[in-house]
Amino acid sequence: MRLSTLTLLPLLAQVFAQERPQGASSERFNYQSDVARLRKIVIESLYSHRDVFLRELVSNANDAIEKWRVVSLGGGIVDPNPLNITLKLVPGENDRPGKLIITDTGIGMTPEELTKNLGTLAKSGTSEFLAKAEADKGKDKDAAANLIGQFGLGFYSSFLVADEVYVSSLAPPTKENPNPVQHVFYSASDAQAFDVYPDPRGQTLDRGTEITLILKDDAKEYLEEQKIRELIMKHSAFSTAYPIYLWATKSQEVPLQPGDEGYVDPEAAKAEEKKEEEPKEKSEDVDEDEVVIEDAPKKEEEPAPEIPQTKTITFNDWDHLNNQPPIWMKDPKTVTEQEMNEFYMATFKDHNHPIAYHHFKGDTGSGTSFRALIFIPPDLPKDYWASPKPTTDSIRLFVKRVFITNDLGDAALPKWISWLRAIIDADDLPLNVSRETLQTTKFMAQAKAVVIKRFIQLMTRIVAEHPQKYDRMMKQGYGPILKLGAIESPKDRTKLMRVIKFDSNLRKGITLDEYVEKRKKGQEQIFFLAGAGEDQETLAKSVHVEKLSARGYEVLFLTDPMDEMLFQALKTWKEYRIQDVAKDGLQFGDEEEAEEKKFIEEKTEEYKPLITFLKDLTKDVVTDVVVSTRLISSPCAIVADTFGYSGNMQKIMSAQHHKDDNHQAIVTEWAMKQRKLEINPSSPLITGMLAKVKVLDDVEEGEEKDKELQDELNEIAKILVDGALVRSGFAVPDSIQFFDRVDRVLRRSLGVSETAKADVTVKPAPDQEESEEKIEEAKEKRAKSLPDMDAPEDLSNVIVTDDLPFDPSKAVDIEIDDHGSGKVGLVQDTPTGAEWDDESHQRLQEMLKNVNGEKTEKHDEL
């Protein structure tokens, strides 16, 4: 909607005429002692970036409007004029500097107030007004509470971009001053004094303040509409309830009018077409008796739609910059999902909707209340896992709807949740004087805890009510993020574990609470098997879950690298112990202790010869050999000791390389060796090995054991143990020896000699230098492949320099006869080329001169 300039402010009239005319009355004031020095500090050191000047001036304008609203409401004044803030950019002409004009329809200032409020650093009219408004019971306290303050410092941020500043202001009529006069405050950035004088333009304002910034030469970027739009959207789009308008250049398609270039009168065009279609009169020379053949009448075609004649015009009009109110200030019940999605995409520059969001009000418990929005982005940042440090810009902090910062430093969210997008708008916070950073306060630490708490509540609701959103999060890689949070944040671990799901040998996507609900009678453990990068089907075939699966116990499958670390940190869930089924100490919960103990003792005694044999053979691989109660069909398995590393953890630790940390390396090496070999007494293979070992041991005292049988048993046992390592998730000590043993066993099973060798005859690679005979042969072959060329015609593109930058004997093969004909080619298939001497070089150059008339340095084509 186009707004009439007259309904806003009469800005178009004499915007450059605030300058005091020669001889006009003016009152000059010196800045208070030390104020000039402090003002210099404000300009040069206080603000980290000069872009904030616009935020400060807009905030001041909002304060002025808010003051007038409270005064008018309290005094019963009906004001027909609109309340708004306008911005106008005026490019410089004829070597004059550009100007930025900011105008508000607020309360305005008298000459005395201009002197007092602008001539005194940190002298804020807001502070005094707020105290007065709170003391007056008839005033609107809510409106008074919206005033930001710090007017003095905010105004002096103007000099970050301006060499000179003019402030024209007109206060409303009062009993003491029924006919106020518009005055101008003027100051240069390096001046030690300021002037206050009547505005030579007269009363150009109905009421309010107009600030004109004479921009510095290096501040011309603030004359660009796009730059101003970006700054308003970043800092001030939500800081005021009053509209902010920019006097912007626009374009529009409009119909051509008579007199415009290229205009064609539609009626005249139709008449001309009709005239061309009328039949011509018969010629007198035509014989009337002559047979006339008439064409068949054509069907009337529908007239083509008229294409409107338009032109593009450029004009200026007011553009509403902050037409989107702060959505977090609304009642959450009144905000639609579409509105929230659009707000997220526009604010965080994302092309996709967030997965989920939460809109809430909070209180830190220390008296500071705030409103907040949190969003789960559709994707994780691409560089999230690239750095161990958290990003510090995930939270946008506002104070009373004024953007303060998105770099919270130490108060930022922890790494595991630093991807979350959040907006926090506090009712009040202690800021530094530049209003860019927080002073030391507990607020952010408390607000951070509230945000994390609300995020976990959001995740709990997603798990219970929106399974599709949860599945989408897992596909986008948020699963490991939640687990990282449970590891890094002990106080949030229990809550996070309730929203983390795992697959099992029986079900997909279950929480620990759901696992506990389906546990077996007497089961006091939560069983899990870790295998980073493995799928559910592979882990289901593991030797460690044979008996568990056969008996119907549920085993969680942990396929993320950090899953096992998470469960080690968790240790228990409610009153149930977390049990790694790949480690020693597996119990089902329904064992008869006496029976199991008796079974183990009996089998240990029965298999003692084999256990002794295996202990001696595997002492460098395992710490013990015991009878297993977890196996059904597999002959054996390697299990980690209670304090050792499982096969999965061993892979993870080996990949991390602790060579620089000697202590850690020692601990890691020790933990990797803490493992046992469990043998299955029900396996035919183990029973067969026991029989062979008994035969081996069945010798009279003083007799030697059967060496052939011992070697065979050694080899079988080593293959068995290496196979158990692989099936249990460990790496074999020497994979080459392992496969050599397998090769020998395969040979024996196929009846192939163990000493038979494969044919290893291979063709050796050619040496760098070849024989002269081969070189000559290659030259003849090239000469036959090159066509005859007439030099003046075919060699016109063969160009060399006086001094070739390469060795021509290894790059070029050239043959030239006395008539100028020759062959030229590149040698690619042999390391050396034709002979090349000074005479050949000279002859080629002479030929090229005859062809081209001059030498051209363009050897790349050759």
Image (tube, rainbow, N blue to C red):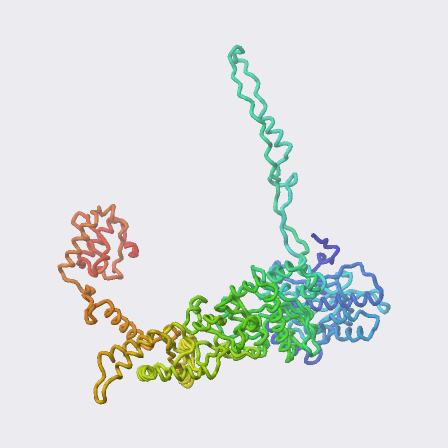
Which residue of the protein is positioned furthest toward the top in this rendering? Answer: 289
Q: Tell which residue pokes out farthest to the bottom in this image.
A: 702
Q: Nearer the viewer, residue 213 or 403?
A: 403
Q: Quadrant of residue 826?
A: bottom left
Q: Is residue 250 left or right of residue 720?
A: right
Horizontally, residue 310 falls left or right of residue 17, namely left
Using the image, determine if residue 475 lies above or below residue 716.
Answer: above
Query: Which quadrant is the C terminus positioned in?
Result: bottom left
Closer to us: 625 or 246 = 625
Task: Tell me where residue 571 appears, x and y as whole percent.
Answer: 52, 80
- The x and y percentages for residue 608 are 34, 84
Q: Position of residue 558 (x, y in %)?
A: 48, 71
Q: As rendered, which of 717 and 301 lies closer to the eye?
A: 717
The answer to whether residue 193 shows anywhere in this view is no
In front of the other: 301 or 491: 491
Whether residue 200 appears in this view of the structure is yes
Q: How many marks?
A: 0
Q: Is residue 553 left or right of residue 196?
A: left
Q: Is residue 779 above or below residue 793?
A: below
Residue 619, by quadrant, is bottom left
In the displayed image of the protein, which residue is found farthest to the left? 773
Hey, which quadrant is residue 33 in on the image?
bottom right
